[in-house]
Structures are given as C-alpha cells and as structure tokens.
Image: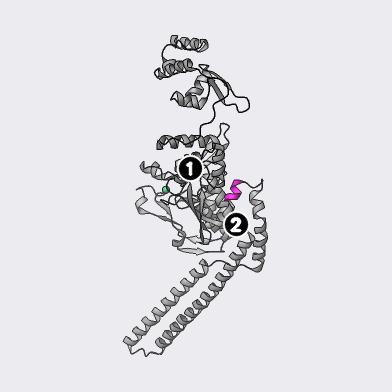
Amino acid sequence: MTLQNIVHNPIYAGIYMHGRRAIDPRRRIAGRTSTGKVTVPMEQWKVVLPGRLPAYIDEDRWRANLARLQANRATAGTPGAVREGPALLAGLLRCGRCGRKMAVHYTHRPDGAVNGYSYGCSRARSDYGLPRCQHLSGACVDTHVSAALLEMLAPAALEVSLEAATAIEAERARLEALWQQRLERATHAADRACRCYRLAEPENRLVVRTLERDWEQALVELERLREDHDRFLASSPPVLSPADRDRIRVLAADVPALWHAATTTNADRKQLLRTVIDTGTGSVIGDSEQVTVEIGWAGGHRTGGQLVRPVARLEQLSYYPQLAARVLELDDAGLPAARIAEHLDAEGFHPPKRFEVFGSQSIRDLVQRLRATTGQPGHRTPTPPPPGRHTWWMSDLARELAMPPVTVYNWIRRGWVTAHQQPGTRRWIITADPTERERLRELRRLPPGYHTRRRWHPDLPPTDRDDHAAKAKL
Ligand SMILES: [Zn+2]
C-alpha cells in the first residue's frame, strides 16, 4: 500500500491538490468514521497546483508512471505487464473473430524449458462453455510480426515515416493558424460586447440587461474556444527537431542487430514491440493453414498480412483438394513416392506441419488413404517380384492375403513368417509357397485378439508359444 501510494500520490511530483479523496455515502458503514473513502479521478479534483511542493520526480515522469501502471493491469483493454516468456505478442494479440484478447499457452519439456507456445481465444469456452474460438501456433505469428517490425524500422521505411511526420507538422501548423483566427474573432466579439454594455445608459434597464447577457455569452464562447484549443495542443504530437531526426536514423540502423543480439531479452523485445505496435489481430481462415494478421501501429496506421500456420492434418490445408488430385495424377503416372514428393515441392505444395517438403512415407500414406476413400485402385505398373522362388514383397503378400501390410510386418517381427531383408534396399522379402500361403490365410482367419487374449495357437513358434502360455496362466 505504501509503495502504491508513493507512485500514485501527486505530492511526490510537487503537485498540490485537493479533492483526491471523497466520501461516498453509499459505502459508509454507520458508526465507523473511516469508511466510505473513494479515490476521485484526476479530472474531477477540485484544486491542482503543479510546482508548489519540492518534487522527487517531475510531473511528466509521474504521469508516465501512472500510464505505465494502468497499461500493466491485466484487464481486457490493456496489454498487461511485459513478462519474460518468449511469446512476443502476449497481451497485444486480439482475436480477429470476436475481438477478445488472445491468451498464450506454453508447452514445456520435462526439464521445464519452454517447448512451444500458441495463441488461443478460449474466453468464450472458459466463460460460457462454448467451443474454442480459434487457436494458432505462436512462432509463426511472432516471426511475421517481428519481420514486419524490422521492415517498418528499416532506414528506407523510416524516411517515409519521417516525411509523413513533416507533412503532419505542416498540417498542424495550418490548423494552428485557423485556431488563432477563431480565437481572435471570439476575443474581438467579447470586446465589442463589453464596449456596448459600457456605453448603454443605465436608465434603459431592459437594454442593459440584454447587452449584459450578450457580453456574458461572448465570454463563455471565448472560454470554451480556449479550452478546446488547449486540448488540441495537448493531443498533437510533439514536433521532431532535426537533432531528433538524426538520432532516430542512427538508432534505426542498429535495430536489426539489437533485435537479434543474444544479450537482448524477450522482455526487451516486447518492450520495443510495444513502443511501435499498439495491437495485433489474428484470424484463422476457416480451419485452414491460412491466417490473416493485422498490425495496428502506434499513431493509428494499420497494415495487413497473410501467413501460414502449421496445422495437424493434411485435410485442413486450403489447397488439399488440388494437392489430392495432383498426388493421384502423379501416382497414376506410375511415379514412386519420392518422385511425387519432388514434384509437389517444385509445384509449391507444402506439408501441414513445420516441414518444408513432403516425405516419401507421408505420400505413400496419402495415396493409400485416397485410394481407399475413392475406392479407385491405382494404375501403378506392378513392380517385378523379388529374386528367388516363391518370394514376395511385403506389400504384395499383404495384397495377396487381403490384409494390411502392417500386420504382415508384425508377423515378420514375431517370427511367424520366413522373411529376410534385401541387402542394400533393406526391403522385406517373404518366402511363401502355396502351402505356406494357405497356412497364413488360416492364421489370418482367426478372430482378432486370438493370439494375445486366448490360448496359444498351435502354429506359433516356440518363443511366442511360451509367451502366450505364460500370459494364459496370468
Ligand atoms: Zn475469438
């Protein structure tokens, strides 16, 4: 409380005031004299006299402290205090769909280090049990915004901003001249009303009263204009001197190096970001990887941009239909998965996660899924059988026995089939003559879980048999 009072109390800034505290009768408790005290907003203080007391800090510093305290409050309208976490837009990013502040979710590794983070709009869910509004990976947004920041502070862009500042100053000078004219006219009108009133004969009481009212009105109007003019001056940005401009240019040249320096903390970066950026808004388009981002720069300028976020599934990609069609087309042409991946990369298709290019396995999975859903078999030219008599590739045997390749692989692992890996390619080759294939078909026909849940199968090799016998005892 003492610290709060020191920072808030204007006495420390040398300001004498009266009316900062008031008694709210509704909050009073009968019989207790110290109850019901409330703090009155600064605009409503009865007396404010700056420079009347020895000051610890100057008035500007005191006001800046108050503004900082207000901004540090974690309420809906403010970004909140800068913290150490790596999420640069914490507190600044708003949801483009509902306008709420987006919360940061960190994930941690077992040793406690931050593994990753994301921005989520889950207010509707936590407050009203509605579905989560939207959620996007943090790193991609932060990369986009920091790039935009460095671009905005690049010397060339800065020259444009300084030019704009010059234009604003010229505009301000023009407006100031208009204000002076209006004030002059109002002063003149008040003077004239005053003279008329003084010249009137006191006997004409009705005339005198009318002139007095005119004078009064002119004075009120002049006072109102003066107050408006003060507000105009207060709201106008300060003028940059040539020395200021030079300092800005020198500092801007150092920004990229500073931004990336190892000694620059996340808190420093956030502080820099907040001096230049007021707000950011992010909206995911549908459920896709496309995100639109809008940055509200200090001073009111807004810029928009598009970025790509990592998504969990291929189907979420905005170009999934085109991608699927192209993959089937290339597969029909008989290209192996690795070549299909190369083609996709060259044509600008990207996988959903953070990887830059597709892997062969993901292409094979995709082809299999697409074939399964479209019910359309591939027109792939069959690969020649492996060398040797009664030998099969794993996938071919799986097709022959009408079962998933992964089950054949499990059988290999358990030693239920005779198999070896081709030297060099490390592809599995299974030896199965017609009798063996019939045995495997029998094995396949057993109900699911037969080997693990029920008693052992007579065809199992001894090790597995022991294993299952032991399991059966348990
Ligand atoms: Zn939202």
Chain-order first, disc 1 or disc 2: 2
Q: Nearer the viewer, mark 1 or mark 2?
A: 1
Is 265 colored magenta in this rendering? yes
466 displayed left or right of 260 = left
Q: Residue at left 65%, top 68%?
A: 242
Residue 180 in the image: above or below residue 272 = below
Amino acid found under the numbered disc labelled 2 = Glu
Q: Please check the rendered image and state whether residue 426 is part of the magenta-colored stretch, yes or no.
A: no
What predominant SS class does the magenta segment belong to?
helix
Estimate the x, y position of residue 37 in percent, counting from the top left: 42, 52
For the C terminus, the image quarter is top left
Q: Which residues are magenta?
A: 264-270
Q: Secondary structure at mark 1?
A: helix
- Residue 356 visible in the shown view: no
Element under disc 2? helix
- Residue topped by disc 2: 151
Residue that badge 1 annotates: 329
Q: Nearer the viewer, residue 209 or 242?
A: 242
